[in-house]
Amino acid sequence: MFQNFDLGIFLLAVLPVLLAITVHEAAHGYAARHYGDRTAEMMGRLTLNPIKHIDPVGTILVPALMFMFTPFLFGWAKPVPINTRNFKDTRMGMRMVAIAGPLSNLVMCFGWALAMVASQWVPESFQEAMQTMSRYGIIINAVLFVLNMLPILPLDGGRFVDTFLPAKASMQFQKIEPYGMWVLILLLVTGLLSKIMYPFISMILMAVQHFMGLFG
């Protein structure tokens, strides 16, 4: 609740949130360029600079409100512009662009795990702050990976699945896209979304824990 709002904790969560959602979008752009579409690059969006990807509502307002009033932290960045007609191999290009964003979150999840391990070697006065920031980074990226990999359009997972479908099945599947966000909202308000995501998030967090254990 708002009365429990902690500015210090909020500020420590800002960097993980910004990185999670902006690197996700940049990864889409880099994958698109690799497969022949330079639209994001020409529009100055092929960058890891968070400012280029900030959406005033999704990157600033929504995460701030959710942090203050809910136990969750979520947001989004401006989608990177992609023209699939420029892909050398359309289906493969769409597939790899779709998976690139979630995979970047998975990589960052383990990157923050390394930061958590490294926190033991920083001055003691910085350890708690670095551990808190790393913890947010791990959880936020695990959640975003699982959420985005749900096989629902317009999420990345839905687009990824779509690239494997035969043409007729793909056309039918794409008809669901206008209702995809309503499906997510319904799953959220009924509590089904957390039940679907929790086992997969737990698996990632367990993998991260084992990964950290490799470093003693």
Image (cartoon, rainbow, N blue to C red):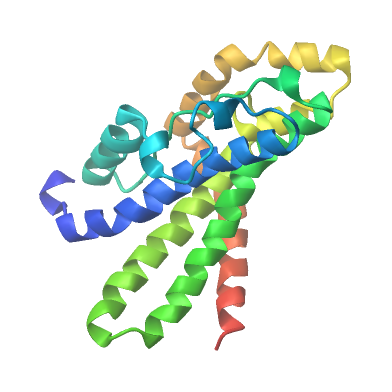
Number of labels in the image equals 0
Image side of residue 31 versus residue 180, left or right: right
The residue that appears at 71% across and 21% down in the rendered structure is 84
Front position in the image: 59 or 209? 59
The residue that appears at 40% across and 65% down in the rendered structure is 135
Front position in the image: 152 or 190? 152
Answer whether residue 184 is visible to the viewer in this image: yes
Task: Note whether 164 is above or below 200 in the view shown.
Answer: above
Image side of residue 76 versus residue 149, left or right: left
Task: Note whether 131 is above or below 85 in the view shown.
Answer: below
Residue 126 is drawn in which quadrant? bottom left
Relative image position of residue 104 (x, y in whole percent): 59, 50
Looking at the rendered image, the quarter that the C terminus falls into is bottom right
Task: Note whether 122 is above or below 46 in the view shown.
Answer: below
Relative image position of residue 3 (x, y in whole percent): 10, 49
The residue that appears at 60% across and 35% down in the rendered structure is 29
Residue 95 is drawn in which quadrant? top right
Residue at far front of view = 42
Relative image position of residue 22 (x, y in whole percent): 46, 42
Answer whether residue 196 is visible to the viewer in this image: no
Relative image position of residue 103 (x, y in whole percent): 64, 49
Residue at far right of view = 166
The residue that appears at 55% across and 27% down in the rendered structure is 42
Residue 123 is drawn in which quadrant? bottom left
